[in-house]
Image (cartoon, rainbow, N blue to C red):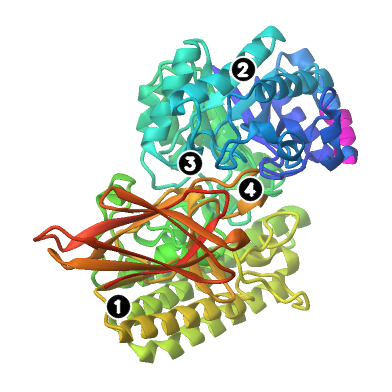
Amino acid sequence: MVKGISFLNPVRVEEEYLKKCAEYAITHGIKHFELIGPTHDPVRGNVDGMTLYRKYAELNDGKDVEYIKYCERVVNEALDMIEPYGIKSYYWHHELEVPQKFDELHPEILNVDGDVEVTHPMIKDFLVNKIEDFFATYPKMTGIVLTLHETRIPLLKLKNQKLGKIERVKYVTGILYDTCKRLGKELIVRPFASLAEDYDDLMDAYEQISQELKVCDKWTKYDWSLVSPHNAFLKRIKNPLVVETDIFGEYFGKGLLPIMLKDHIKAKVEYCNSLNILGYVSRIDRDGFIPFGTPNEVNLEIMDAAQDGRDVVEAIDAFFSREYGEYADIVKGVMEETEYLQVKAIMADKRNLTWLSLFPPLFVMKRAYQFLRDDFVIPQRLIDAGIYGYSYDAAKAEHKEVIEEIGKRLAIVESLKGKLDDDKYYQLWMRFKNFHIFAKIIDELTTLYRSIARYFEHRDESVVETIHECIRTMKELDREGFEILGNDFYCEALSLEKNSPFRTYGLTSDSTDPRNSHVYLLDKTLLPAIDMEMAADRALRSENPTDYVICGGFSEEHNLKSEGNFSAPITFEDGNCRTAGSQRGKVWSTVKTHGWFSYDMKVKGGEENTITIIGKGEGGVLSIDLSIDGVTTKHSVSKDGKAAIKHSFVAEPGVDKVTVKIERNSEYMPFIYSVVMN
């Protein structure tokens, strides 16, 4: 069975850690060695960021040549280390990827929508040449692992293409597959996507290319939640399958909170072993945080034993005995059940309160708060994802239990000071201290959500002071954590530039701020967003419309539907809005993605209704496709700043609700502030 690790996820190559991973692979029988690298970095990510082009040398101007030369040396040295042990090596790559300057030098590759026409001959030539350049630079690399989602030019989201979705996936993947095969290299594909239909389209394309094409897919449905069900899609895959795992706690503490994934790993391995799989490749780090030398390294030992069919409990005992000597039982005792404590703290009632276990940015807060509304009904799609309910009282009770339990364990850890090796003690204590403070912050965050829900559900002005008080309390806890732990404090560390840059998606911090913690800056990000939404809500209510939505706000329910990376709320200085495209614009995408979102809105049946959309567009052009119950009309307004689009229609007799869908239809990204029905 294949035993694999993936690492440097998704950060720049670091020599010492890369060679540490190579040593681990050699000593633990790892046969699949997968380097991820800074995937979403438009300069250093993917094959493009690791290679100097030869035929297309004019596009090297925007590259970090120093980083490429560094990678060429250290990656090849690591490949030299593992090659004698028969270890296969792979590099993560996203397609379609073309440099920003490419369309400027070769505008003929673009169609009328400003998107790349996938079948243009120059695209194929560019793809073939850059893959050849990569393997010429890293000749001992076995192959690449390909993702066609969350890419700079997402194949499934392009418009007006000569090929349909499946055919264009076949076309691009086929170019890479044939090139790798000709060079004696391997291609492994990941069918990861946000929608079930996209998964199916990707796998249909891959199967048609070759029944021998290797596939790598996650062992959890959706993403790395500890409460998500098994990935049933694995049963649908007929091609040779390698299962991708997370044994680091990517969404649960990123290694800075204590977690021992004994039951989670055992359950997932048992499920996956019941299928016809080649083996596993496990993510062992995230955002620059690593497992080695920490108590969380036990998860690597658990996975190693589970996939070998060895006794997991014996592997755990051996790890703690080796690392903590006579205090092994004490350390193992405090680590027991930490996966469940994290679920209770971070996912009260199985609903995620944060974002990748970070303190959440605004757009995640806006998704989570609605579960604390009195009238919220859990949609079936969330029940299918393993999310069954949410209540304020249950969340607070769970948080109280977690805070008390972690406090007890922290006291036990502190009793080991002077007994354990100083570094081992600190690595253990720091994680439990972080968890104790962070659990208190999350408990306060739950009260904040509840207060926001009370306001927009009941227009209860009395909770406004509670909102401010919650933020003051969280900032005090944040200050306490920083004073005790410095840059190792959970909320601070996750905001450092070298790991996870602080982003507010619109509102930004003052450069004079002494700190960059998400919690510390709440009054400069969250409070303005809430104030603007409350003001907009009061103004729209006073007009007594049939219905209205403040887009990108906390009150944006209306059975909102959108697709992950291709629609996102943003808070600008002039209000909250939602994009119909990539949340990161050109930072994420070379060409802006064709996103969409929709609402169910009340109408007057049998009468004329008028919908008014307030928005603004990049370049002073607000251009959208507006669909009402599937009937689409195109609209475009040229105006600097906010503009209004009005559209009248007659609703069918007896109809009291319609689905309103807004979609980008041009090169200009639309930002929609409100949708009003009269």
Q: Nearer the viewer, mark 1 or mark 2?
A: 2
Q: Secondary structure at mark 2?
A: helix
Q: Distance from label 4 to label 1 (Cα)?
A: 35 Å
Position of residue 316 relative to residue 80, above or below, is below
Q: Considering only vertical position in the picture, is 158 above or below 494? A: above
How many labels sit on residues?
Answer: 4
Q: Is residue 285 highlighted in magenta? A: no
Identify the mark nearer the N-term, 4 or 1: 1
Residue range highlighted in magenta: 66-75
What residue does disc 3 label?
A: 262
- Mark 1 residue type: Glu
Q: Is residue 103 left or right of residue 316?
A: right
Q: Quadrant of residue 59?
A: top right
Label 3: how many residues lie within 10 Å, few (<14), some (14-19) or many (20+)?
Answer: many
Q: Residue at x 32, y 47 (%)?
A: 386
Q: CA distance from mark 1 to mark 2?
A: 53 Å
Q: Residue 588: which numbered mark, if any?
A: 4
Q: CA distance from mark 3 to mark 4?
A: 36 Å
Residue under circle 1? 457
Which percent across, then down, holds residue 13?
78, 39
Query: Residue 363 at x, y = what percent?
Result: 50, 63
Between 363 and 302, the one lying in front of the other is 363
Visible residue check, residue 89: no
Give the residue number, with chain letter if any, for mark 2.
Answer: 175
Position of residue 560 measured from the top left corner of the image (x, y, whole percent): 34, 58
User: In the rendered structure, which amino acid carries the disc numbered 4?
Assistant: Trp
N-terminal label among 1 and 3: 3
Element class at badge 3 = helix
